[in-house]
Image (spheres, helix red, strand yellow):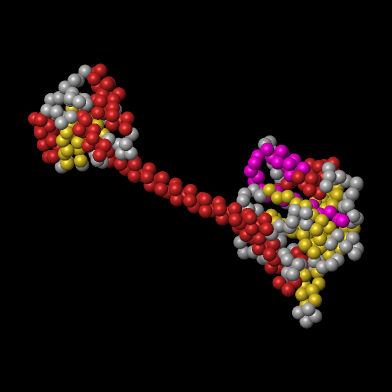
Amino acid sequence: MKILLVDDYPIACSVHSLLLRSQGHEVIEAADGELAWRLIEESTISFVVSDWMMPNLPGVDLCRRIRAAEFERYVYVILCTARGAKSDLVEGMDAGADDFIVKPISPEEFRVKVRAGERMLSLQQGLAEKNRQLVEINSQLQLAHTRVEDDLKAAAWMQQRLLPLVTQRAPGVRCSWRIQPSGYIAGDIFNLFPLDQDETGFYLLDVCGHGVPAAMMSVALSMVLTPDATQGSPLRRYDAVSGRSQTLSPEEAIRELNRRFQSKDDRFFTIIYGVFDTCSSTLRFAQAGHPSPILIRRGNGSTVLGTGGMPVGLWPEIEFDCFDISVCPGDRIVLYSDGVTECVNRNGDTFGEGRLLAYLSDKQELPLGELLNGLLSEIKIWHANSDFSDDVSLLAVEIT
């Protein structure tokens, strides 16, 4: 180890230097504190053995200067002094000395104290290296986190592009929607689209689970649930011979979805799929394990429809809940995910279907967008937390 020996008395300096070299150390000598200080500043010296009483800069003041400098490395300081009083020891410790040797110096004591300093510096250097490695690892983790966050933001942006326009219209209907994902991306997705000149389809689905796997499946489902029969849509059947396509009933569409999405990893999803026929003013629904939609009759309160049924993807042969209702202009259908009714407050109470029905009945005269804005605000107030444990999705369809 490289040790700086500071002593203005040449004989003592030579004796101490010989002792240190006999222990295998490289010794640099300085005759006063100022020279020692310049050497410490200009090199990587981390071990100093200094006499207390010296001209220009005494050892105790050199120690104070070293501690005030706050080097990146730790500098271990042993003060050598003939002053053995307790007050001198306290002064030296206050100045930042690590150890003391009282003159005359015993060679064995000198060897032991230098070895103790070596161990201390070795521990300090090991700790510094570990801290450096931790800083590097933390920097790498921060970079990885930033990249993941950027990817999730990009995925969220792409997922938003798959949703309908906020004021989407189709033959006989218009819609409005709101979504509050539990993270950057959601396992919920919905849409509204014309199936042909007389029929409009709409759905809201919720993939079991959270995070990237659920979001990826929801995106895959949104790509599958297209009205384009030539692309193998489960919503319409294409006849290659006649070149014509036919809209499948909601029940047939859900059965086809269930056939395609038999999962081997226990992943499944719930969905409510409806078709509005403008000719008959009829809404036909298939419900697969999804919360029951709410019908708001114009000026006549709200009603829960359906009984639930089983989710898609659990078993090959499942019975799904299917029903038809007649509607009039001004009637509304509200679809929502279970993140709405199962949203809890600080006491652990759920928002519940009752509060949802009460709000929709009380505010049914509001324009569609304002109705959903108010409902989402009510849910956020109830939850009293900026983070949701589940996706909150709302899709309202109004008969025009």
Q: Quadrant of residue 351?
A: top right
Residue at the image position 10 percent from the left and 33 percent from the top: 14
Figure disc tally: 0
In the rendered image of this protein, does residue 287 appear above or below residue 238? above
Q: Residue 239's spot in the image, x, y percent?
A: 78, 77
* Magenta-colored stretch includes residue 398: yes
Image check: 58 left or right of 271? left
Residue at the image position 80 percent from the left and 66 percent from the top: 195
Residue 144 in view, yes or no: yes
Residue at the image position 10 percent from the left and 30 percent from the top: 10
Q: Quadrant of residue 134?
A: top left
* Magenta-colored stretch includes residue 396: yes
Image quadrant holding the C terminus, namely bottom right
Q: Residue 189's spot in the image, x, y percent?
A: 70, 56
In the rendered image of this protein, does residue 98 appear above or below residue 356? above
Nearest the eye: 121 or 251: 121
Instruction: Write the start and end of the magenta stretch as one range.
Output: 374-400
In the rendered image of this protein, does residue 363 appear above or below residue 332? above
